[in-house]
Image (tube, coloured by chain):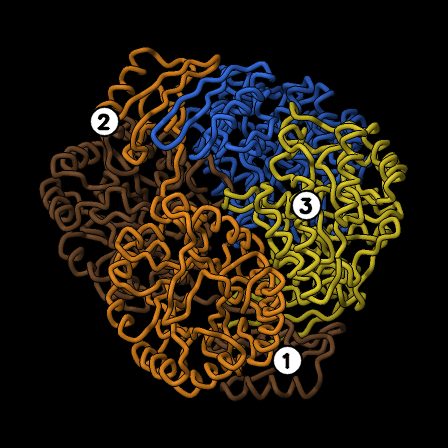
Chain colours: A blue, B yellow, C orange, D brown
Amino acid sequence: MIIVLKPKVTDKQIKHIQDHIKKLGLKTIISKGIERTIIGVIGEEDILRIQPLEVIEGVEKVMSILKPYKLASREFKKESSVIDIGGVKIGQKEVVVIAGPCAVESLGQLKKIAKAVKKSGAEILRGGAFKPRTSPYSFQGLGEKGLEYLRKVSDTTGLPVVTEVMDPRNVDLVDKYADAFQIGARNMQNFDLLKEVGRTKKPIILKRGMSATIKDLLMSAEYILSSGNFNVILCERGIRTFEDVTRNTLDLSAVPVIKKLSHLPVIVDPSHATGNWEFVPSMACAAVASGCDGLLIEVHYNPEEALSDGIQSLKPDNFDELMKSLRKISRSVGRTI
Amino acid sequence: MIIVLKPKVTDKQIKHIQDHIKKLGLKTIISKGIERTIIGVIGEEDILRIQPLEVIEGVEKVMSILKPYKLASREFKKESSVIDIGGVKIGQKEVVVIAGPCAVESLGQLKKIAKAVKKSGAEILRGGAFKPRTSPYSFQGLGEKGLEYLRKVSDTTGLPVVTEVMDPRNVDLVDKYADAFQIGARNMQNFDLLKEVGRTKKPIILKRGMSATIKDLLMSAEYILSSGNFNVILCERGIRTFEDVTRNTLDLSAVPVIKKLSHLPVIVDPSHATGNWEFVPSMACAAVASGCDGLLIEVHYNPEEALSDGIQSLKPDNFDELMKSLRKISRSVGRTI
Amino acid sequence: MIIVLKPKVTDKQIKHIQDHIKKLGLKTIISKGIERTIIGVIGEEDILRIQPLEVIEGVEKVMSILKPYKLASREFKKESSVIDIGGVKIGQKEVVVIAGPCAVESLGQLKKIAKAVKKSGAEILRGGAFKPRTSPYSFQGLGEKGLEYLRKVSDTTGLPVVTEVMDPRNVDLVDKYADAFQIGARNMQNFDLLKEVGRTKKPIILKRGMSATIKDLLMSAEYILSSGNFNVILCERGIRTFEDVTRNTLDLSAVPVIKKLSHLPVIVDPSHATGNWEFVPSMACAAVASGCDGLLIEVHYNPEEALSDGIQSLKPDNFDELMKSLRKISRSVGRTI
Amino acid sequence: MIIVLKPKVTDKQIKHIQDHIKKLGLKTIISKGIERTIIGVIGEEDILRIQPLEVIEGVEKVMSILKPYKLASREFKKESSVIDIGGVKIGQKEVVVIAGPCAVESLGQLKKIAKAVKKSGAEILRGGAFKPRTSPYSFQGLGEKGLEYLRKVSDTTGLPVVTEVMDPRNVDLVDKYADAFQIGARNMQNFDLLKEVGRTKKPIILKRGMSATIKDLLMSAEYILSSGNFNVILCERGIRTFEDVTRNTLDLSAVPVIKKLSHLPVIVDPSHATGNWEFVPSMACAAVASGCDGLLIEVHYNPEEALSDGIQSLKPDNFDELMKSLRKISRSVGRTI
């Protein structure tokens, strides 16, 4: 930690700051420059991070040397993590495609879509049983019935299944049915939920919040990791910006940035990011070229009648075509699908 | 709902769209312009709103005529709502100041601050027992112990008390101790939590999410209202933008905008918005001048040692001075404090 | 400047960095912490600021101690600057209201509006002769004819006049007619234009760009100041965010922030910020309560027929009423209008 | 144009609105719904677009049916445009790479870099002679000397050259030396400059502004096109968001979106978008996979000593490696480099 002092700081103020830091068991080094005096602090930066040093008289600003996350950082663990969802490994040479409907609507619907996406090469099934909808008047999901369908279709097709959990009270329930949890963008900083899934052993796909920086995303991952569950997969799904022609702005630079800062795998959800099926294929291709470890794609055989997010769903035909393109691109960047 | 068709839409496509809409029990009117044909839909717009009409062949775009929220709208209820927190009325001529520490740290700390803010004119006490912290390594709040202190100090001082609830499992617990719930910015779209507090009768201060539009905020209020609880107070507390000299960007235009669109009272939290005590007084003054119904202000007698958000806390002296300014400003805009 | 080194930096790399800095005539101090080694640099920070130190091997990050602007900073000049526009002083106890139509449309229109706003208490007239319009098909302003009208009406009414200059080739022309230049938000980083107005002696109202941080705004002011013209007034007029119910998001916290960082006066433009006349009065009131030195308000007697920005223009009656409110508020914060 | 009326609109108000529209030579159709009456307008939408209809009493909101740009739209011209820069065609099967230093520093520097990038497969040279720098104290470019070097090196290497023009007064000068103009992000809405380059016949690379929507970008292109110059290439280079780990957020979805809305070619600048050479290769790969027509990449053999933007410059070796990857990816999406 570096503490920059104000131009007219007094000796008494400097002493007060030093005493404050010493009380916390840390050492200080003073360095007088031409325009500013700075105090360097030696010792565990975390102790200081939670201290509001900026309010102490004479302090101009405080600058961190280290990153605020530990367990999620590449420094903590150099080798990239590989997370296993029902036997499918994410974080290796293979780019894993997770596909399915936005919401589970019926057993028939789910089966039909699952078979289609499996045939095209998807390895994991997605589908929502609990749906976070902006409007209380929209379809809220089938709840436990939806979970049952997911399990049933997973068992029939052999595709492991991932589904969203929104409420800490439902973690055990979802745990019984799903192979992996999904934490949605709106819940990325629902810390009680993060702790709750952190207590399970199931893999967790943690989606970036709409107003979350990459650092915030890693801090939320840290909540899960520090609760004991290291099976976290990060998911870029677009952030909120002023651009409104797409639903959100897909921040693909998050892929190489996260790869540099963290050992956790990163997948990309082009469906929610663009909010429009027409733009999903090019963004899925771009995501693979950027180096992501997987994709989360919404598919529905009849988007017109979909109960949720029909606009962004690919039809099975388009999905099949996309998978062919993705295979070529993944090969061109030294990976497989 | 207005459906704009593509330039080369075929008659067959138009018929398909009309049939689709008729099946939903709505009527259509076709209007052919020079460059586009449009279909106007007559009947309950809500039925269509959840339909992904954009994916139907021949549709270029779909435009809503009505607002997606009902119960929260000024059209639904013309007179401004007045919400009662433990006897203090919010939404009338009087601007209500809610003050207290960010986090409850001890009984002594809370008492001391409560007495100070009461003396200066605050009418409601705030204080966090459950704290949503970005880092798992930061102080997470005293939990139920904190709630007990809040109750005790409320009873002693006569100040009703508001505190944040983050977990739907804690709604009943918090209900026992607090006079009003606070839903934090990070939980504005935690829909299970919204439904849960919606089932109680307690007033709810609903904070705007960092990436929430005003429409999103009203939709979240709609969740609570449609669950049966109409005692909702909206709170502007800053949104996330590219500007980083303040923690968030306080969007004061939200005050007159919400006053126009909704009957619910609006309060402003300048402490979280700016993240810096030095800017709190001017933003508090501006908020009152903009027409808000109340303020939420953090106060701590020793910010240097505060366990949470010390940087943005006013000292009791500064708070007292601010209250004097606020009184003058409120009078100048025809209100009182 | 503080240079944080990577965990595994070698002695050779450290030496290379030190040599690089010494070549620039600066001194270094090395400080080894537990997890990181840092290099403090003593001497003129500006020399280093333009060096891409981050690309040198072994460097993790570089942190500035000082602010990148000098002449615009409060440290350079402690007392607040007072700028004189045709005899009207901005930056003193009096809050100065600048009002007029968005665009000059005719001599009659301008005269009528000028008389009205003067009667209500405005002290400076605004009006655009050159209009930066998003669409090439919109009214682009009357050009020099508009400048002539502005001069004429200024002479008749005694109101000094401010108008926008967009093109460096027109600086001399506008200089002949206007009492102050306005640099619009879209040209805040049109550096050739900044240098050109910096060579004149006329006051300049510099509007914050839609995606400019306050630091960026002060850097643009620095361009003008370093060209020799110290008569700069900064103007907050809203930034671009995801919120779309208002045209831009008025960032009123910019007022106290700029007051802290700079000696230059700050005015606020609620008309462009909100883009809707209904929200202009409350934001004008809030701006004065926040401590601004002036307001820029659009007025038109017939907004329905205005050739530019009619939606955000107040009618003379509403403006008159607003001035009465502003007078009360300014008194309540120890100022006058 | 659709005009939605307020719930309690009077017949007199409706008549006033209709008369207003008829005076403009347009026809109206009234349609009474259950909750709202709407007026559809038939005729040239452009006439209405510049009218502030929202201020007329009784009007709730106004919704456009058509897009505000014409010449830039895919509807105006179905086939994709191909733009020729000194013999190199942009907008065909081949993805064109434009590379070079951020700023021209000397003849030797430029030659060395030009040779290197040509050898690796770049087809056009870039280099700045006039530099838009945030700080007045940073290197501002060599001016005409830099243009001379660009011409000389272009003639020697056979690489056509593109360079930025910032000042309308320099358009003729730059025209003498360069094969194409670049309009930088900060000048995307410098309308006088747009008109000035629009009067030439040279191709123009128009960069998206940091706070510009895709619609804004197309409107700026419309300025150039409507001035008579159709040789416009659009460039995505990142927008300003709250994420600060990269300099800007590269919005790659702009590529398919622009391809859908416009006939103009789109290129991507991953150097300015990320602001960090480490992330340039993955974003360049992603851009090609997303379907862009070209790339703009900064290269410097000694980034440590670069006078501008060294942090984001690739070294020739890294650039060469990247070109190899790009060749593979372009083949995988049916294109060439």
Q: Amino acid at mark 1?
A: Glu
Callout 2 crowding tier (Cα within 10 Å): few <14, some 14–19, many ≥20: few
Front residue of D287 and C219? C219
Q: Quadrant of the N terminus of chain B?
A: bottom right
Callout 1 crowding tier (Cα within 10 Å): few <14, some 14–19, many ≥20: some
In which image quadrant can residue D279 be found?
A: top left
Q: Which residue is mark 1?
A: D57
Q: Which residue is mark 2?
A: C25
Image coordinates of residue D14 in percent, x first then y, are 65, 84
Do residues under tags 3 and 1 come within 8 Å of each other at their CB atoms?
no
Callout 3 crowding tier (Cα within 10 Å): few <14, some 14–19, many ≥20: many
Give the letter of the chain under mark 2: C
Residue at point 67%, 66% (across, down): B332
Q: Quadrant of the C terminus of chain B?
A: bottom right
Residue at point 37%, 37% (across, down): D275
**Do badges 3 and 2 share one subunit?**
no
Give SS at disc 2: loop
